[in-house]
Amino acid sequence: MKNILHTRKIDNETERVLCWWKERNEFVVWTRYKTDPDNFVHGHYFKDLISAVECFDKLDQDQIETRDKKLKALITEQINSAYIKEYRSTRKDPDGLGLLISKYFKWDGLQILKTMYIALEDSNYHTLNRKIWDMIENEENERKNLDIKGQGV
């Protein structure tokens, strides 16, 4: 019998599961696929809970590091493609990430502001975030007024 102690979503299809496996007298960290919730795969087995939790958390840290490396590569690629060689060294990560966000949202200022709002909220910049929210509301109201007048957005 497996007693699930903790789960953590990895993505839409998979989750990590920390279990106590009574018959084996072991803790196990598994990956479980949502398409088959009874199918536990890629197990790591431990005799003590501390080691199991460390593994559970380390696997998450590895994913974070992989994601950060991929993002850094995208930012660097964006800087290299957007700026001539002489200016690349003066450009930093915010420049590249800003260009990526702008292009992703097809230069829609409202979507860019909403993205900034979420980033500031996550960073607990509440006072500054209130100003961004006011900007978002103003932009949404302007767009509504344009729609009412039949001009479109």
Image (tube, rainbow, N blue to C red):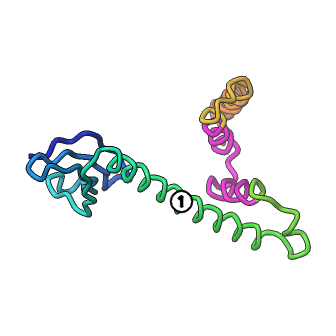
Can residue 152 be seen here? The reply is: no
Circle 1 residues within 10 Å: few <14, some 14–19, many ≥20: few
Q: Quadrant of residue 74?
A: bottom right
Which stretch did the figure color magenta? 96-119
Is any atom of residue 122 visible in this view? yes
Decide if residue 19 is on the left or right side of residue 145: left
**Furthest residue to the right?**
86
Q: What residue would you read off at disc 1? A: 67
- Please identify the residue farthest to the front as the structure is shown: 47
Residue 81 placement (x, y as % from top left)? 75, 73
Q: Position of residue 3 (x, y in %)?
A: 16, 41
When the figure is inspected, residue 83 is found, relative to residue 22, above or below; the finding is: below
Q: Is residue 42 one of those drawn in magenta? A: no
On screen, residue 76 above or below 93: below
Task: Decide: is 4 above or below 121.
Answer: below
The residue that appears at 48% across and 53% down in the rendered structure is 61
* In the foreground, 42 or 25: 25
Query: Does 7 sit above or below residue 90?
Result: above
Judging depth in this view, the residue of 34 and 38 nearest the camera is 38
Q: Secondary structure at mark 1?
A: helix
Q: Decide whether residue 100 is among the magenta residues.
A: yes
Q: Quadrant of residue 126?
A: top right
Q: How many marks?
A: 1
Q: Residue 146's spot in the image, x, y percent?
A: 68, 34
Residue placed at 31% from the left, 51% from the top? 15
What's under tag 1, amino acid-wise? Arg
- Quadrant showing the C terminus: top right
Question: Which residue is drawn at the image coordinates 29% and 44% (left, top)?
Answer: 49
Residue 53: x and y in percent read: 35, 46
The residue most toward the bottom is 85
